[in-house]
Image (spheres, rainbow, N blue to C red):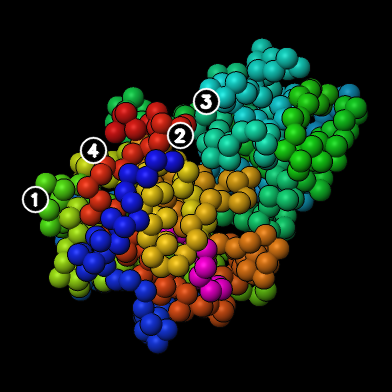
């Protein structure tokens, strides 16, 4: 990577611009408690898990707006307000009125919803379906990388028409992690349409699952959402095809990997064989499964409106102040749902009250500093991240400031201050020039800046920074890092298993307040450095995602 700024230049900008170098331990503890106070408010049981569009979500949003107002930030939402309203369709699958079964040689064997599989809630589902099943390996459509599971010698595209495709998570080792993750989003649904497939069944690999199947199944009671019909959809699709919604019904389900042998029985292959290849990131066979799936899907459709929140700190440079550097996080969580450990409120303390609290603390520190950054800052708190990054996707396609003036996005989503801060894993690090500033500021703070060591978890596409990647905006997302097998790694995996998307992600969990404060200091300094950087951030020529930059 060619450094477009030297470390010495970054240090010089610190000394000249009022950036906040590392604090003392005592100050860290105090600053960490101030950050935690926001988390306590947003993850309190009275917020009922901040479900998108709920009264409690709006109450949490009002708290965020009050903080922005008290810091003297300007509203940058719609019609002179701090809010950008977003409209959604809500789909709830009624499992008790739905059914699913396999048919082999004319004999039908019912499957148990929740035990064998769960039905997808986000995209429109057909009311009934009866179609043959085919296994297409990883389900990746990447013709640019000369890889296509939708058109292979064993199973050409012509054999997918009218079929339900079955695929397993992961991908071959020679494909970059971000590229494999990208293929799971808009290109996947388009590939299904282009092939004439009528549905898709995904099989997660136990290795890549953040928690066990029981928790996956309990989440099926959650409503799914999609953006309401956009009258400007065609213009958006022309400008940013990666943000496009593919309309129409497609059957969608997720199969329990412990029950997946039912799909492979009689094929001459076993799921155990396929899983071993996937775990080793090796090529997979593709073949017809010799059976059909029959399903009846009963859904309930409603509508809801929920806002993003947008605040501005005007930059000091007469020219650069027209550009915006975003610091963002999501406010929504899972609301009230199936009980876990006797609790029904999914409070979302780490996911993502912690990130919103950091946005508030960074905004406060930058607004209080008499030395304003050269570019303007935009502090954005998104709705409906848990429903598929919908709030950020809407904002990226319909920004409340001129689109061409968005310079970068620095995003927070459960950044995980549960142990001391030594390393950060950064999504998107290898894609853009933002890496230069991140590494330089990290060096000043004594923090190692590293790439994601677990790309097959698909974290690259599971946080709001990805909406900006799709819109051609350089973007990064951050999590506390670890070394494989270390105590920090074990703490991270234990947190995922016990607390992620669980009622245990609440205010009782242990948190390293000083580490949170140190991270907030790093992020504020990084945001200021990016805002002061005379160079324009851009995607590297080596990045697949550079193609999205031209439409910006």
Q: Residues within 10 Å of mark 2 (few under 14, many from 20)?
A: some
> Overall secondary structure of the magenta stretch?
loop
Kind of element beneath mark 2: loop
Among all residues in the image, which is located at the extreme left?
A: 318
How far from the left and from the top, in percent, is residue 308?
32, 54
Q: Residues within 10 Å of mark 3 (few under 14, many from 20)?
A: some
Q: Are marks 1 and 3 in contact (CB under 8 Å)?
A: no
How far from the left and from the top, in percent, is residue 419?
56, 73
Please tell me which of labels 3 and 2 falls first in the chain. 3
Q: Are marks 4 and 3 in contact (CB under 8 Å)?
A: no
Q: Residues within 10 Å of mark 1 (few under 14, many from 20)?
A: few
Residue at the image point whose x is 76% and y is 41% from the top: 280
Please tell me which of labels 4 and 3 falls first in the chain. 3
Q: Which one is nearer the viewer's eye here, 424 or 408?
A: 424
CA gap between label 4 and label 1 equals: 17 Å
Q: Which numbered circle lies on residue 318?
A: 1
Q: Which numbered circle lies on residue 404?
A: 4
- Residue on which the image places disc 2: 543
- Residue 526 placement, left or right of 319: right
Q: Residues within 10 Å of mark 4 (few under 14, many from 20)?
A: some
- Residue on which the image places disc 3: 190
Residue span colored magenta:
411-423
Q: Are marks 1 and 2 in contact (CB under 8 Å)?
A: no
CA gap between label 1 and label 2 equals: 32 Å
Quarter of the image where one finds residue 167:
top right
Asked whether the viewer can see residue 115, the reply is yes
Among all residues in the image, which is located at the extreme top?
A: 158
CA gap between label 4 and label 3 equals: 27 Å
* Front of the two marks 2 and 4: 2
- Residue 143 placement, left or right of 99: left
């Amino acid at each position: 990577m060619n450094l477009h700024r030297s470390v010495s230049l970054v240090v010089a900008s610190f000394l000249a611009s009022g950036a906040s170098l590392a604090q003392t331990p005592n100050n860290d503890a105090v600053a960490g408690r101030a950050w935690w106070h926001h988390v306590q408010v947003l993850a309190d049981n009275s917020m009922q898990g901040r479900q998108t569009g709920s009264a409690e979500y709006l109450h949490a949003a009002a708290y965020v707006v009050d903080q922005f107002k008290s810091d003297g930030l300007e509203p940058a939402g719609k019609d002179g307000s701090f809010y950008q309203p977003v409209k959604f369709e809500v789909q709830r699958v009624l499992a008790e009125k739905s059914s699913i079964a396999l048919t082999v040689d004319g004999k039908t064997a019912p499957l148990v919803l929740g035990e064998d599989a769960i039905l997808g809630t986000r995209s429109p589902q057909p009311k009934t379906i009866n179609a043959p099943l085919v296994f297409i390996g990883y389900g990746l459509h990447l013709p640019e990388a000369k890889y296509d599971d939708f058109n292979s010698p064993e199973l050409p595209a012509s054999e997918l028409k009218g079929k339900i495709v079955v695929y397993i998570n992961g991908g071959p080792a020679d494909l970059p992690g971000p590229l494999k993750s990208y293929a799971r989003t808009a290109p996947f649904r388009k590939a299904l349409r282009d092939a004439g497939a009528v549905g898709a069944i995904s099989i997660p690999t136990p290795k890549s699952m953040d928690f066990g199947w029981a928790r996956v199944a309990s989440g099926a009671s959650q409503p799914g959402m999609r953006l309401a019909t956009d009258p400007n959809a065609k213009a958006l699709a022309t400008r940013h095809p990666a943000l496009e919604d593919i309309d129409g019904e497609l059957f969608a389900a997720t199969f329990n990997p412990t029950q997946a042998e039912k799909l492979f029985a009689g094929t001459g292959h076993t799921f155990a064989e396929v899983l071993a290849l996937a775990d080793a990131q090796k090529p997979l066979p593709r073949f017809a499964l010799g059976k059909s799936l029959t399903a009846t899907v009963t859904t309930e459709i409603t509508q809801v409106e929920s806002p993003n929140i947008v605040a501005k700190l005007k930059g000091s440079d007469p020219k650069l102040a027209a550009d915006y550097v975003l610091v963002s996080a999501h406010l929504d969580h899972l609301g009230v749902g199936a009980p876990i450990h006797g609790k029904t409120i999914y409070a979302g303390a780490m996911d993502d009250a912690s990130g919103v609290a950091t946005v508030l603390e960074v905004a406060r520190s930058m607004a209080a500093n008499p030395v304003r950054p050269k570019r303007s800052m935009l502090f954005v708190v998104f709705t409906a991240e848990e429903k598929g990054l919908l709030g950020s996707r809407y904002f990226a396609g319909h920004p409340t400031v001129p689109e061409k003036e968005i310079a970068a996005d620095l995003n927070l989503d459960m950044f995980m201050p549960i142990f001391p801060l030594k390393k950060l894993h950064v999504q998107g690090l290898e894609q853009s020039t933002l890496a230069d500033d991140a590494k330089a500021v990290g060096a000043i703070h004594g923090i190692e800046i590293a790439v994601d060591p677990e790309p097959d978890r698909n974290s690259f596409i599971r946080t709001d920074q990805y909406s900006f990647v799709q819109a051609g905006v350089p973007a990064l997302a951050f999590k506390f890092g670890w070394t494989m097998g270390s105590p920090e790694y074990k703490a991270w995996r234990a947190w995922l298993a016990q607390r992620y998307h669980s009622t245990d992600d609440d205010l009782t969990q242990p948190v390293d307040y000083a580490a949170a404060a140190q991270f907030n200091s790093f992020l504020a300094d990084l945001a200021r450095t990016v805002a002061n950087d005379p160079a324009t951030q851009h995607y590297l020529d080596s990045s697949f995602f550079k193609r999205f930059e031209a439409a910006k």
